[in-house]
């Protein structure tokens, strides 16, 4: 007998929004035009996620490695983050979306930090979609922070080495309050993680599409979810074991 899908809809979707630059280049536009278009895509996707009642979306907006891009692009991206937050936060709030940021915000300008803090506090009591924005984030940075925190507790003798386990490490990482992502989507054709949620994606289903981020839409999110619903998540067990527990 074929195994029935265990979960049909993912609770938590992690997205690498890649391909803005190539989208712009193919139209003879500056890269920033691709980023602007990418913001519109994200807005539509969030509206769709609210409609289909997804619990959590975590989007990769800026990696720690992205600082290495030309200063002009980085500066324009920072301006875009500020203007996008300022123009979108009211609507997000109206849609009952709770916005949080992961990553080291202290390296951003005061203006951007203020926009981030304000969007988080305005939406903090909302009970709908949780939108996590990874900005100045990387998976290795996240793990290093967790190691530092654990090492400090050991140094101050509030923790013993034997107390270190998966649960403890998870609790020290970004997204500690969330279930691990069920579905990872990367647009733009590259099949890599690019230092995203390294620990949290241990058993996440990975979905790659050639579609460039500005061209991604609600229908394509539905396709990815449909693909996800056909996966059999075994978490190390056998297919037969899963079929037994389902029947
Ligand atoms: C992703 O699109 C957005 C950010 C990294 C900020 P890219 O800018 O990486 O677009 P491509 O990959 O160059 O097409
Ligand atoms: C990953 O995309 C980061 C974001 C989407 C924010 P990149 O375009 O930076 O990834 P690489 O450099 O192609 O791996
Ligand atoms: Mg890219």
Image: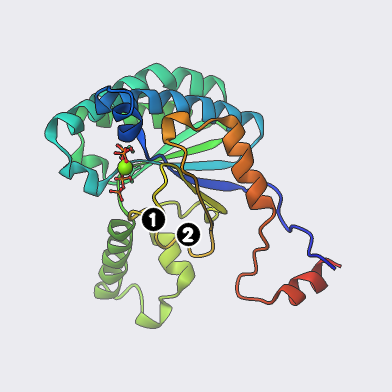
What is the x, y in percent for residue 181?
A: 53, 53
Between 58 and 74, the one lying in front of the other is 74
What is the x, y in percent for residue 132?
A: 44, 40
The answer to whether 210 is drawn above or below residue 152 in the figure is above
Q: Along the horizontal axis of the image, is 76 left or right of 209? A: left
What is the x, y in percent for residue 146?
A: 33, 63
Q: Which label sits on residue 201?
A: 2
Q: Is residue 128 visible?
A: no
Between 97 and 200, the one lying in front of the other is 200
Give the residue at the far left of this rendering.
71
The answer to whether 17 is drawn above or below residue 123 in the figure is below
Q: Which label sits on residue 77?
A: none
Q: Is residue 168 visible?
A: yes
Quarter holding the C terminus? Answer: bottom right
Q: Which residue is mark 1?
A: 193
Q: CA distance from mark 2 to mark 1?
A: 9 Å
Give the quarter the ligand 1 occupies. top left
Quarter holding the N terminus? Answer: bottom right
Assess disc 2: are there few (<14), some (14-19) or many (≥20) residues with their C-alpha within 10 Å of its C-alpha. Answer: some
């Amino acid at each position: 007998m074929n195994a029935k899908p265990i979960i049909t809809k993912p609770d938590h979707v992690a997205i690498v929004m890649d391909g803005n630059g190539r989208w712009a280049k193919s139209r003879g536009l500056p890269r920033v035009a691709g980023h602007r278009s990418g913001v519109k895509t994200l807005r539509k996707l969030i509206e769709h996620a609210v409609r289909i009642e997804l619990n959590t979306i975590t989007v990769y907006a800026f990696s720690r490695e992205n600082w290495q891009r030309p200063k002009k692009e980085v500066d324009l991206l920072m301006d875009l983050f500020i203007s996008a937050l300022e123009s979108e936060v009211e609507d997000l709030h109206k849609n009952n979306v709770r916005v949080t940021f992961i990553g080291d915000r202290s390296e951003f300008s005061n203006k951007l930090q203020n926009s981030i803090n304000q969007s988080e506090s305005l939406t903090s009591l909302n009970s709908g979609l949780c939108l996590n924005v990874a900005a100045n984030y990387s998976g290795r940075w996240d793990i290093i922070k967790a190691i530092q925190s654990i090492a400090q507790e050991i140094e101050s003798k509030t923790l013993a080495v034997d107390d270190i386990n998966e649960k403890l490490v998870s609790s020290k990482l970004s997204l500690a309050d969330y279930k691990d992502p069920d579905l990872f989507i990367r647009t733009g054709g590259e099949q890599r993680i690019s230092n995203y949620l390294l620990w949290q994606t241990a058993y996440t289903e990975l979905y790659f599409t050639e579609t460039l981020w500005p061209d991604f839409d609600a229908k394509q999110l539905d396709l990815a979810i449909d693909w996800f619903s056909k996966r059999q998540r075994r978490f190390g067990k056998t297919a037969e074991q899963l079929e037994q527990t389902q029947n």
